[in-house]
Amino acid sequence: MSLFSALSVAVTSVNTLNAATRVVSDNVANATNPNYNRRISQYSNLQYGGVQIADIQRAANAGLLRDLYQQISTSSADDVRDKLYQQLEQLVGTINGQTPLVDEFESLRTALKALEASPESDAAQNDVLIAADGIVSEIERLSNGIDLIEDQALNDIEEVVTNLNDALTEVDRINAQIVIARAAGRPTSNLENLRDEQVAEVAKIAQIRTFERSDGTLSIYTTSGIALVDSEPETFTWNPATRVLTSSGSSSANLITSGQLTDGQLAALTNFIRTDSAAISSSNLGVGSLEKFRNQLDELAFSLADDSTARTSGTTFVRGNADLTTSGIVTAGQTLTFTVGGALQGPGVTIGAGDSIDDVVAAINTTIPQVRARVDGNGHLQIMSDGGQFTIGGTAAAGFGLSTSQVAADSELTLSYAYKMEHAAGTVPLTTGTTLSSINGVAAGDQITFNNATLGGAVTYTIGAADTVQTLLDTINAQEGMYARLGAGNVLEITSDDGSLAINEAGVGTPLTALGFTVNGTNVSILGTPLASESNAFFVAESGTTPQDVTRTNFGLATALDNRSLSVKTSNRTEVVQALNAGARSMSGSGISTSTRDYTGLSNAVTTGLTQLGNRATRQAEESISLKSSLEQSLRDEVGVDIDEEMANLAVLQNAYAATARVIDTINQMFQALELAGR
């Protein structure tokens, strides 16, 4: 080998050692960078002697990286859900161990008990109004707070979609650089590290699968098959007004409701604010959570303003169905019929082609006596009666999920009904099958008259020879605004919440006296009639519409009580306390199922349910974040930089560099000797 050849070999060695040293230096500099995979120099011999770096590869573990990407998606979604539930819990107060909503209900209970004991006390009446205002204000505060959380979530979604589009564009740009670098024979490990960092950002937002192509590019798809980066980056579009998310890589009209977002920040945020029927009925954590809480507040408000005597809800989600017939819920020509107190009410309702649920509700409320309808907080058709137990018939009942069997009246009166009702009760125990004429002092042909504000005129009932107590109940309940039942002690109770109740002996016999009613001449003594200075309404819809229109947003105290122009009605104070304490309240749907509760218990069930969901979200977030950290550490241990190993590599390179330097020095001395010899 000539001296020039030897020198050439030594120079390649120096150049190669310099490049290898730079690789080690990069590794050491990035020892604490969690997105850096250590680089490894690969050497090869030159054809005519010497050495070069053939490639600079990076340490990798595709399987572990794939697992990490999946866990990044899961932990990011869990973290988002946890933070959203924490905001809800902070709003409700449970995160601080407080329950303002429940406390307000307890304050009303305490105030009403004090009013029951001292009805003449102005202070007791004022305390009732303050407590009632507190419930209204708290429900309003919670409703407004939900809206604020939702607004923030909408802003977060817009930001996340922007970040996703930016990350996909960056991955595509780096893919192109890798192709160019490979074609030029340059190492691509640094570019691959940068790309992994962007892919991890994508994994935070959506659950993904990656595929490396033969040219070094990386294709990314969601686990549901939506292309994110392939031949080009896809673009996501978010419409906050319609709550619709679309992608240029998918034909789906809405990626949210189609279920194509499996996990990640974007799925967690969009699922949390969903309002569709599938979300409301879903038991998955974080799906439709805000709407479910809204629905629960709606039902809580309705339970306070509800003055019906019996009610039932369907199981079919009907809210938002513009056309019930084309949606397959019912077909045109199907009917609903209602029987209250043994009497068919009105002509029934026939479903027309193109009818919406609003059309059906309006038809029931305007044409069917004794019956009211609404769409409840869970999106189901709810039927209510003003005359106690009722039966639903007709071919459309099944489509709405309504039971066609007899629906019994609540065993206890609602708070609003107890406050408003004017009533009278006998003292003689009865059974529904007892023949009236068999009761001492009652004979066939005896007459009773009754009236209220709705009837507008007296109705006379003549006792037939075969009439039973049930016949009398059916007759009274068939009248608008009247409600009769066998109450505590099985005595006959007759009530009305429409005012001006009058029950009289009609001049033929004295059947009311015989049944134990307090009669002054021919007039029955009526309890619960408000004084001129008293309001006959308590909780109402602020808009002045009927109680079935009450929601969390229009729920309020009666205007006359709110502005203190009238005082609290005191004659029914005992019945109101009993209604407030009665364990007959229930709520089912929108993520909650609770029954046999009093009003405080109902509010407590709402807050407790939210706390349980929040605790579950926190546990999941802690577990998934811990698992992600473990996977990250395992990956770092395998592909990250080990300082001790790099120092050892540097020592080897240093020794090789010193040896090469000696070779070059020796060759230099030989050249000098030759030069001197040639002189």
Image (cartoon, grey):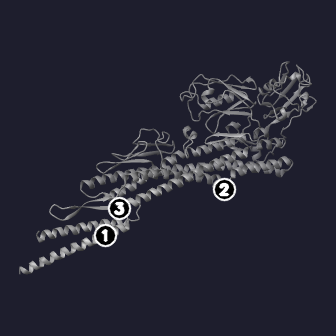
- Above or below: residue 105 compared with residue 586: below
Please identify the quarter of the rendering in which residue 49 is found.
bottom left
Tell me the tag on residue 650: 1
Residue occupied by mark 2:
97
Residue 38 is labelled as 3
Q: How many labels does the image show?
A: 3
Marks 3 and 1, how far apart at CA: 14 Å
Q: Quadrant of residue 468?
A: top right
Q: Position of residue 458 (x, y in %)?
A: 83, 26
Residue at the limit of the structure toward the top, as seen here: 465
Compare marks 3 and 2 and give the one earlier in the sequence: 3
The image shows residue 274 at horizontal and vertical percentages of 54, 43
Q: Residues within 10 Å of mark 2 (few under 14, many from 20)?
A: few
- Residue type pointed to by label 2: Gly
* Sequence-first tag of 1 and 2: 2
- Residue in the foreground of this view, choosing between 457 and 2: 2
Name the foreground residue: 410 vs 453.
Answer: 410
47 and 318: which one is in front? 47
Q: In which quarter of the image is residue 491?
A: top right
Which residue is drawn at the image coordinates 24% and 66% (left, top)?
16
Q: In this view, does 78 lie to the left or right of 134?
A: left
Residue 235, given in percent of the width and then of the height, sits at: 40, 46
Give the Cα distance between marks 1 and 2. 58 Å
Q: Could you say whether the residue bearing mark 2 is in a helix, strand or loop?
A: loop
Residue 405 - label: none
Instruction: Point out the frontmost of discs 1 and 2.
Output: 1
